[in-house]
Amino acid sequence: MKKIGVIVLLLLSVSTMAQQNARPNIVFIPVDDLRPILGCYGNTNIKTPNIDRLAKKGIVFNKAYCQQAVCNPSRVSLLTGLRPDSLKVWDLYTDFRTKLPDAITLPTYFKNNGYTTIGIGKVFHNIFPDAASWSEEMHVQGFPFDPDAVYTDEPNLSLIAKKKENLIAKNQDRRDQYGIWYIKANATEIGTGTDDSYYDGAQTTMAIEKLKKLKQQSAPFFLSIGYYKPHLPFTAPKKYWDLYNENELPVAPNPFPPKNAPDFALFGDTELRNYDDQHDLPKPSENPLSVAKQQQLIHGYYASVSYVDAQIGRLLDALDTLDLSNNTIIVLWGDHGWKLGEHNSWAKQTNYEIDTRVPLIVSGKIVKAKNQQSNALVELVDIYPSLCEMAGLPIPNYLQGRSFYPLTKDPNIEWKNAAYSQFLMGHFMKKDIGLDDKMGYAIRTQQFRYVEWYAWKEGVRGAFLARELYNEMTDPNENNNIVSDTQYESVVKKLSAALKLTY
């Protein structure tokens, strides 16, 4: 009898291991500030051959939306499967664990179900890494804890040296947890170093070495490589700048605020102004930058995107070389958009299409609709349940998104009729303009974007302030707020009711 019992236990163990081995690996690729102006999204000016290669092996979601167009709220919403109002995280300064200490994040859920989870780079907001989510959390030595502002060349190195001297003289120590000074200089740099001189190249090298080790283990893995570029500053090796003729790069066709929009709806544009060569950046209501200065910034953004594209190409090559591609789901996503002069602004942090629409590409053997696109409305909060279903794991019933796995089989099926975003305006720029907090709630349907603005204080919604309505069919750049047009009264009423059901 003892022998029979041992045999049964061995068979059960072998069966469990076989089930785990059959589960797909996950390669998770967040890209900071990446808007959907990639080749696979129809942009013919930018060079993104590797992301385009990924798209040919998977599905491109043309109408994917973040839940709030700034890093921390967007990322923790995706990674917890909860909307910002449920998390009570609306800014860059709140650690979601202080609000929901027992939240089971997406990687935690996979770890609890037999996966080895590895976090490299920026996955959660960089100042709030979440150790509970990972079997192992990795960082490239020699780089700052927040490695977006890494410079390698003059005059940025001289600027940093001078700032460092001034801080030391004032007894202001700004070294991070690794003992490295984190100081911003100019908004651009044409680097003379190698790809690994910047963090995204170095972390890709680290990720490839980790893949070689993960291949040897029996358990499936969830590997996240979070890329910092094209986040400011726009720094990349010279060869990526050389891909473009700066004088030929098109500038935004609408360098002005939307007509009839609330005057506060574009105030979230202070980020670029913090760099030494951009302190005089015009506000959205002022005259725009010269075309030459716009093209310089666009050039930097494009070069940074092409640099990250090259790193993603290295990652895809490694998966192929290691024979891991066939059993790996790859999810590439941007945490929010970024304005390149649209509405005379250079940042994220609004409720407009240009900031809330994001790239989302899902690839892998399980994706049947390869080299296809979907115009269905999907949200970043949908990724958590989608990956659960694609990996054969039960979907937790508390998640607030909807699995889009059916769309990866047939991208043309009828789908949900709205996507939702929000933004806490004023919270990031009190020092600059003294703006009181205002919460804007947005609903995006196939035809319209509708926004309601409310006063906001300490997490509590106050008085109603303003509305916006844009017809995406006739005004895709959202240049004209038509909420006062009487022919749209019924539309406003319907969309307002839908917002109240969600928030």
Image: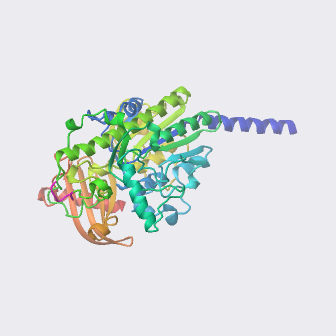
Quadrant placement of the C terminus: bottom left
**Residue 400 in sight from this viewpoint:** no
Is residue 285 magenta-colored?
Answer: yes
Q: Nearer the viewer, residue 99 or 154?
A: 154
Residue 153, quarter of picture: top left
**Looking at the magenta stretch, what is its main secondary structure?**
loop
Whether residue 6 is visible: yes
Q: Residue at x 32, y 44 (%)?
A: 35
Measured from the top left, where is residue 373 in percent x and y?
34, 34
392 left or right of 31 in image: right
Q: Residue at x 58, y 40 (%)?
A: 221
Magenta-tinted stretch: 282-287
Residue 83 picture location, percent across and down:
41, 58
The residue drawn where x is 20% and y is 53% is: 344
Residue 265 is one of the magenta-drawn residues? no
In x, y percent, where is residue 70?
37, 56
For this rendering, which residue is in front, 16 or 127? 127
Question: Residue drawn at (45%, 41%), measured in percent from left and top?
Answer: 197
